[in-house]
Amino acid sequence: MLATALTVIAIVTQDQSALRAAPKDSAAQQAVLWQGDSLEIRGEKGDFLQVYDHRRERAGYIKASQVRVQSMKQEDAPELLSIVRFLKDSPGSEALGISYAAAYLRAAPAASINGEVFAALGAMSDRLAARATAGRSGKAGEILAAHVEVAATYGMTLVSHEQDGQVQLCSNGEAQRRVLALPASDIEQALAVLSLTRHECVSPKLTPLERYAHDNWRAETLDRVALGKLPEVLKNRLHLRKAGVWASLAYQRARRPEAGAGAARDAAARAIDELAAINPSELMESDAAIYSDAAIRVGASRWAAEPGTPQPPLAAGLGVKVSAGQPGETCVHLVDARHDEKHPLLSRCTWGLVWPASAAASPQGDTLTLAVQPLDTWREMWVFRKGPEGWTVDVLPPALDNPHLGYVEFAGWVPGGKQMLAAREVRSDNRYRTTFETVNLQTLATDRQADKPSSLTPFYRWQSPLWKAGTVAVR
């Protein structure tokens, strides 16, 4: 870091600038400097400046054309801020913008500093994290890595999270928290909150207790943002983020008896309400993936908003009862008019959440479906079937890849007893997909599918009214 007594510094503006041992192009190269590096000026020799690099603890000479000499006096602070305002929206210049923001914070009197400069720092840090997560190869990758190092020297470090073999880089959130603590505009505060509450930046290493506390903090932080004066586009993004956070809380509260019977129901209802609050006419094309992401999260936990017992009468008395198994485990018992919980047709235990309200029996009484949610963003369908040798149960997952984001749900029975209807939403290979399907009850394979219910005749004719009233797949 530069000494606080400096009143003039040199900020490197060109990548791969050479710090040389003497003021000539043929001199030995001491170090390679990158845009955003700050240098102490100690003299001038022709076209070169004599400088000292405090980060690398090296002295040398650099061409004057490769740096910008910047005064650090209080009266020059407005000029620094104007440069920050320009660079904050310049992709690829994040390291340089962060350097100027740091210079402004040193030059400006404390009383004049508000949330604006920290909002710019947060935006540039987020953009740099997004570029680093996407990754680059070759020379572009080398430059990007150097920019990340430069940003870290000013405290804008990136936090990495690994999930499913992929690394997600995120801002450390320090600048965004300063925005919330200082006077700032409604838009600056909203953007800071959106940055702090990103789903992909929640550490997968958090324990259940830590994750529960973190999600409660996310919900409280989002609720502190005043929506009144925000543009509709930003309101939509806040509603979508709230929907995802409350859906996660619904799942977590349902797993915590001490939260109370109605706590999970309230959280799920809040998630559904937030998703319904979207203004479709102001939903940008760039937000389509965010919308799908929020809808899948809400869809995965939507049964938490329903009563805990099956709503429709089930065929032939067929139904399910649940009981506690090992600590944290739930056992499902398939029952009918002649088989109770102690003498069930079939029992199976799971560490996931079982939603008894989702149980649906076929008119013939030989098939029953049940929603089981092993993760807050992943809901499967259990299918109980009666065969020549008795009852069996199979799991129909949203997709065959790693459980991450998706749900599949029962949507109706096709007359004849050979097919059922299912709706499926999933994110796979970073693509979102919604399908409405006819599923073969013998193999559980998809016979036909469409992207809209109206495009599949059996689905259009035989979809369950109860499914249609509660699902978020049709929106």
Image (cartoon, rainbow, N blue to C red):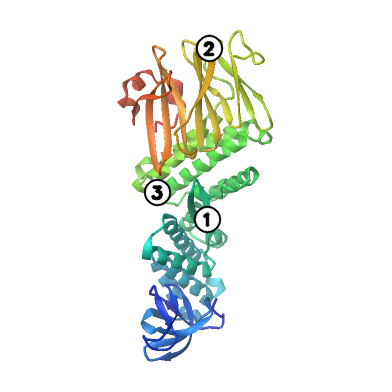
* Residue for badge 3: 233
Between 274 and 146, the residue placed more toward the observer is 146
Q: Counting other residues with Cα less than 10 Å from the Cα at mark 1, is it few (<14), some (14-19), or many (20 or more)?
A: some
Observer-side mark, 2 or 1, equals 2
On residue 160, the disc is 1
Q: Earlier in the sequence, mark 2 or mark 3?
A: 3
- Tell me the residue at 47%/33% (across/down): 407
Task: In the rendered view, tell whether residue 39 sits above or below residue 441.
Answer: below
- Tell me the residue at 37%/31% (across/down): 435
Q: Could you tell me residue 200's position as x and y percent?
A: 49, 48
Q: Could you tell me residue 70's position as x and y percent?
A: 44, 80
Q: Could you tell me residue 345's position as x and y percent?
A: 59, 14
Instruction: Give the structural element (helix, strand or loop) at label 1.
Output: strand
* Residue for badge 2: 389
Where residue 310 sits, quadrant-wise, is: top right
Between 115 and 357, the residue placed more toward the observer is 357
Q: Could you tell me residue 313's position as x and y percent?
A: 53, 14
Q: Are marks 2 and 1 in contact (CB under 8 Å)?
A: no
CA separation, marks 2 and 3? 57 Å
CA separation, marks 2 and 1? 51 Å
CA separation, marks 1 and 3? 29 Å
Task: In the rendered view, tell whether residue 11 sits above or below residue 181.
Answer: below
* Residue type marked 2: Glu
Observer-side mark, 1 or 3, equals 1
Q: Counting other residues with Cα less than 10 Å from the Cα at mark 2, is it few (<14), some (14-19), or many (20 or more)?
A: few
